[in-house]
């Protein structure tokens, strides 16, 4: 959806900053969200995700810059007149109202007020959408976390907002329920076609649900892109580290060609690297780090069995084995590369039994697995 | 074993309260009820007997009942109306660093005795107080003291903090995100107040009202001083019957009646409040 250039942007940030006293919760954020897109803000605690969301909802005013909603500058428009709705982290359901009243709340504020029959129909429709029919007269505090979460969703969706804002809506749920709700949310978004902006600090959640992910750090956007791009082409060491896991091997740049460069890692091996971080100008002699994902590194007891094009092969000692269910993670140490991690799928046990702590193995990866990033 | 120990702990915890309750509340009440069926002794006080005369006689104090039953609810209502905006300001609008000081300022006058504070009002409302100021602007002969107005003013003033604090607490603990949620769903400030803030602070109003109402029903200093004997409460009747005319059995009957009326009122009030809550939850709109 994001690549559909014909869609006009529904939310636009233009040079938006927000200061709380000395703290810059947002600095110079510029961003366009396409109509119908599912965008996530991802970042560590305190990086300004909630603040960004609250500026769209209208609970905070930008200190600098402009926020546009559907082409209209909304800096001075109060929250209750903005065509967006929010699902709060703790749901913020009205405790003195039953489910029906909670869900109908938005419609009851409209003037002229829709007819009772219309409201009934709308409530029934959204409760159907979130599979909560029959719960109309329940008190909200008599419901489970997942059910409350769906009431909060229904309460927002009934208003048919142009943008639905979700602030860590799944954080309070247990892992299994969270997974289910992620899928439900994603399906829901496709069905209703409303723009979703989700805040989360769970990278798995952001990657699996969104069309685009916006990675934030200390009030700034550090990278924005499709989940696969973020994972395969992180713009910086920060992103490579934050999205998924990565090993970072220090290296020195050798010969530089048009779209690749020879990089020599500490083990003495030189490899042609053709993926780089954003805006990197490499010159001979520069220091860089090579980011290599643990799942790109193959471990074996017999070095000959490594694929021929594995340019990097190092003898390593197994420091630790961590069983993760579907994978096994190994922590290793080698003279050339230092300490690093490798991930072995369970299938690999068909070929070789799991490695023991202290065992000497050979680790190998291809040149394509490495990406050169600024050394910081 | 564990169960027995638990029972022991429960007894230990409840025991003192139960003894206190029995000794200081139930016992006196029983004595009062017994007295109310007795007769006045020749020199006043009580002689044992069993007669309903005291209760049949109550109509002779009808005015005191009427005054109390009208002024106490009215005073409670006025008190709530004055206290709510103050509590709202304190809990919502006042800058956080001023809050504690403002709360303390509300209590400070109550470090002085009630008698003194009411006397002060007597001076303020008396002929050389506000009326003399009004004379300066040409309003002659305004009588403030010894009126129902003065009594009501005294009652509101005297019990305001008891109303402010419960309301303040209920407003203070109100989840601010509910207000944001309401705004997010399209409700302006006034609608949010009516639909979220007010209903969620009603428990505080109810607690405060109950406290103030019960105390106002037994009030006698304020009507005596500011009402000048014209506005006579049941409390004043009791003072008179027990201390002056020493007709203890009649006084006891009056006391039993007022306790009965109070209990009935509170029961109805609670039922109404609870029922209202239930209704809100269960009714669709
Ligand atoms: N009302 C406020 N007053 C002062 N500082 C604030 C306020 N709201 C946020 N901040 C500060 O702004 C920064 C960003 O806060 P924000 O709530 O946007 O973070 P976040 O990314 O949502 O974090 P989390 O994942 O923990 O929710 C933080 O340093 C925070 O302390
Ligand atoms: Mg947050």
Image (spheres, grey):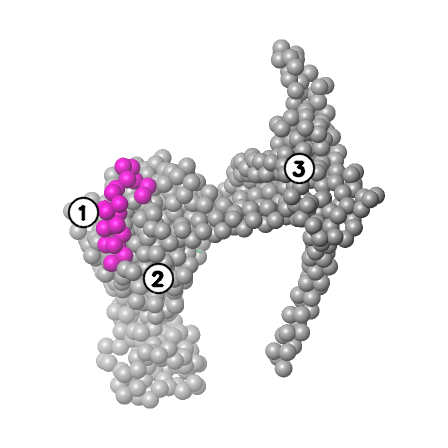
Please name the residue that numbered disc 2 is placed on. Answer: A147
Q: Which residues are magenta?
A: A108-128
* Image quadrant where residue A167 sits: bottom left
Q: Are marks 1 and 2 in contact (CB under 8 Å)?
A: no
The label nearer to you, 1 versus 2, is: 2
Q: Point out residue A151 in the picture as x, y percentages from the top left corner.
A: 33, 56
Q: Which mark is residue B56?
A: none
As measured in the structure, the alpha-carbon distance from the residue carrying label 1 to the one carrying label 2 is: 34 Å
Residue at 29% x, 60% y: name it: A134
Q: Residue furthest top?
A: B138
Q: Chain of mark 1?
A: A
Q: How many marks?
A: 3
Residue at 59% x, 46% y: name it: B261
Is residue A113 located in the magenta-colored stretch of the structure?
Answer: yes
* Image quadrant where residue A215 sits: bottom left
Q: Chain of mark 3?
A: B
Please name the residue that numbered disc 3 is placed on. Answer: B61
Q: Point out residue B64 in the picture as x, y percentages from the top left corner.
A: 65, 36
The label nearer to you, 2 versus 3, is: 3
Q: Are marks 2 and 3 in one subunit?
A: no
Is disc 2 placed on a helix, strand or loop?
helix
Is disc 3 placed on a helix, strand or loop?
helix
Please name the residue that numbered disc 1 is placed on. Answer: A7
Q: Chain of mark 2?
A: A
The label nearer to you, 1 versus 3, is: 3
Q: Of A325 and B36, which appears nearest the observer?
A: B36
């Amino acid at each position: 959806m994001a690549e559909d250039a014909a869609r006009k942007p529904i939310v636009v940030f233009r040079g938006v900053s927000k200061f709380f006293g000395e703290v810059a919760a947002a600095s110079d954020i510029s961003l366009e969200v396409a109509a119908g897109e599912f965008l996530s803000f991802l970042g560590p605690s305190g990086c300004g995700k909630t603040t960004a969301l609250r500026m769209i909802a209208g609970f905070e005013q930008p200190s600098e810059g402009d926020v546009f909603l559907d082409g209209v500058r909304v800096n001075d428009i109060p929250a209750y007149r903005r065509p967006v709705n929010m699902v709060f982290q703790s749901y913020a359901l009205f405790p003195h109202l039953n489910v029906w009243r909670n869900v109908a709340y938005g419609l009851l504020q409209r003037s002229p007020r829709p007819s009772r029959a219309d409201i009934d129909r709308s409530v029934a429709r959204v409760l159907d959408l979130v599979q909560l029919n029959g719960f109309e007269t329940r008190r909200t505090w008599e419901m489970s976390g997942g059910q409350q979460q769906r009431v909060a969703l229904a309460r927002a969706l009934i208003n048919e907002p142009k943008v639905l804002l979700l602030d860590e809506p799944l954080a309070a749920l247990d892992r299994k329920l969270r997974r289910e709700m992620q899928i439900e949310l994603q399906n829901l978004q496709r069905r209703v076609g409303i723009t979703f902006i989700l805040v989360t600090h769970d990278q798995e959640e952001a990657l699996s649900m969104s069309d685009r992910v916006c990675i934030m750090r200390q009030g700034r956007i550090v990278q924005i892109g499709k989940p696969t791009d973020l994972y395969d082409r992180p713009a910086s060491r920060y992103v490579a580290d934050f999205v998924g896991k990565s090993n970072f091997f220090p290296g020195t740049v050798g010969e530089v060609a048009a779209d690749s460069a020879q990089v020599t890692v500490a083990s003495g091996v030189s490899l042609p690297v053709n993926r780089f971080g954003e805006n990197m100008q490499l010159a001979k002699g520069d220091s860089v780090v090579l980011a290599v994902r643990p799942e790109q590194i193959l471990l074996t007891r017999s070095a000959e069995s490594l694929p021929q094009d594995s340019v990097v092969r190092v003898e390593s000692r197994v420091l630790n084995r961590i069983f993760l269910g579907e994978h096994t993670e190994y922590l290793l140490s080698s003279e050339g590369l230092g300490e690093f991690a490798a991930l072995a799928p369970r299938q690999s046990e068909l070929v070789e039994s799991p490695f023991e702590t202290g065992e000497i193995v050979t680790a190998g990866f291809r040149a394509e697995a490495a990406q050169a990033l600024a050394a910081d | 074993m564990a169960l027995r120990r638990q029972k022991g702990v429960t007894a230990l915890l409840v025991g003192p309260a139960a003894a206190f309750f029995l000794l200081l509340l139930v016992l006196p009440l029983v004595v009062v009820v017994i007295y109310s069926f007795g007769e006045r002794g020749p020199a006043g006080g009580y002689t044992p007997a069993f007669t309903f005369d005291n209760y049949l006689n109550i109509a002779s104090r009808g005015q005191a009942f009427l005054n109390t039953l009208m002024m106490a609810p009215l005073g409670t209502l006025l008190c709530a109306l004055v206290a709510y905006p103050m509590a709202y300001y304190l809990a919502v609008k006042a800058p956080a660093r001023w809050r504690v000081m403002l709360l303390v300022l509300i209590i400070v006058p109550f470090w002085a005795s009630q008698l003194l504070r009411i006397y002060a009002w007597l001076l303020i409302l008396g002929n050389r107080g506000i009326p003399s100021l009004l004379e300066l602007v040409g309003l002659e002969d305004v009588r403030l003291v010894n009126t129902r107005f003065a009594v009501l003013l005294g009652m509101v003033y005297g019990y305001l903090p008891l109303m402010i604090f419960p309301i303040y607490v209920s407003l203070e603990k109100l989840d601010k995100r509910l207000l944001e949620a309401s705004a997010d769903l399209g409700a302006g400030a006034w609608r949010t107040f009516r639909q979220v803030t007010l209903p969620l602070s009603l428990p505080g109003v109810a607690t405060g009202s109950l406290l103030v109402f019960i105390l106002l029903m037994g009030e006698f200093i304020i009507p005596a001083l500011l009402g000048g004997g014209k506005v006579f409460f049941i409390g004043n009747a009791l003072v008179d019957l027990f201390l002056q005319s020493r007709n203890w059995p009649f006084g006891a009957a009056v006391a039993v009646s007022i306790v009965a009326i109070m209990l009935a009122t509170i029961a109805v009030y609670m039922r109404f409040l609870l029922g209202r809550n239930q209704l809100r939850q269960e009714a669709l709109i």
